[in-house]
Image (cartoon, grey):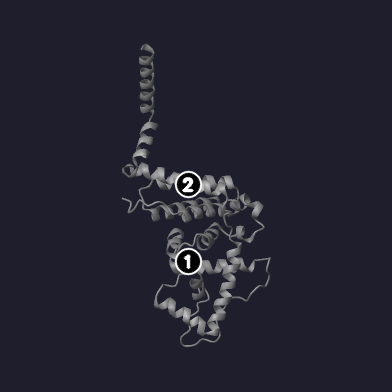
Amino acid sequence: MAKDHDEVRTEDLKAFVQVSRAFWSDRGRAEQAVAETLSAAALLDLSTDQTVERAASALLERAVREGMAANSRMNIDLIHQPFYRLSPEERFLLVALHGAKWSYSRVARILNRDSGALEMMAWNTRVVLASSDTAHPGQGKYPIGSKVNGVNCPEYNSNRPWTQRFMDDEIPAGAQKLFLQNHVLACGSCRTVLTRCREIYFTVDAMVPRLAGSGEENAFIAHLRDILRRGKLICNPSHATFFESLGSFVQRVDVQVALVCLVGLVGLMLVGK
């Protein structure tokens, strides 16, 4: 049984649209893919979080099945943008972290990777994409660790540095986060390392495509919400409101035939009078 019946957050629906556009530049194809995927996921008796993750995984698998070459041909009009030269998995990862602001744990489950592998993939993708930024060639320095490490400086792993977790807001709240915040203020070396990572982060952030927030996009997001709600009501009809139940009842063919006959009978009776 599903653990909850809350509606999917608007931010997650926007994320699905953004992910689909990252896979397919053709708007019609992207909207068809995300609508079909959410329609299928909605018919599964899953919690809200499970529905989001299952649908995201299915959407990614759909793009991956096409193959890198085929997907590149579909996005030929945008292939000059370095973002669209990344693999579908890498594009998904960046949209999930920069656009949707999904947690490492959620993205790791969708990509079927452990957290360490996810961090390495994110760092490598960001460094590669930032280095391809032709608009600002040579901007910033490569984000290496400090050569001067104090006894209190956090360990710097060049494959998945702590600075990336800091920028992604993945440092656990509490003593550890407070320590890092205070340490960066006091330690010039670590502050320099964080600054270099921040340059990479925001360079990549500017290269990740965003939604325009147009009326058409908002209408499509509302349509996706309706798709999910109708699918969930099929799985759990007991959660329907009175008017939703009445609407479903009236839409049945046998009920519509009976209503037509009833209206006809009433009309004959009125004519007879």
- Badge 1 element: helix
Determine whether, in the image, residue 120 is placed left or right of residue 264: right
- Give the foreground label among 2 and 1: 2
Where residue 76 appears, as percent x and y from the top left, is 65, 52
Determine whether, in the image, residue 137 is placed left or right of residue 46: right
- Badge 2 element: helix
Where residue 241 appears, as percent x and y from the top left, is 35, 42
Please report the residue visible at 35 percent of the width from the left and 15 percent of the height from the top: 269
Q: CA distance from mark 2 to mark 1?
A: 29 Å
In-front residue for pair 120/176 = 176
Where residue 232 appears, as percent x and y from the top left, is 38, 45
Determine whether, in the image, residue 136 is placed left or right of residue 252: right
Looking at the image, which residue sits at the far top?
272
Residue corresponding to mark 2: 224
State the mark number for residue 108.
none
Near mark 1 (Cα within 10 A), the count class, few <14, some 14-19 or many ≥20, is many
Near mark 2 (Cα within 10 A), the count class, few <14, some 14-19 or many ≥20, is many
Where residue 221 appears, as percent x and y from the top left, is 50, 48
Residue corresponding to mark 1: 118
Q: The residue under label 1 is which amino acid type?
A: Leu
Q: The residue under label 2 is which amino acid type?
A: Leu
Q: How many marks?
A: 2
Mark 2 vs 1: CB contact within 8 A: no
Please report the residue visible at 47 percent of the width from the left and 81 percent of the height from the top: 182
Q: Is residue 228 above or below residue 127?
A: above
Looking at the image, tell me whether mark 2 or mark 1 is earlier in sequence order: 1
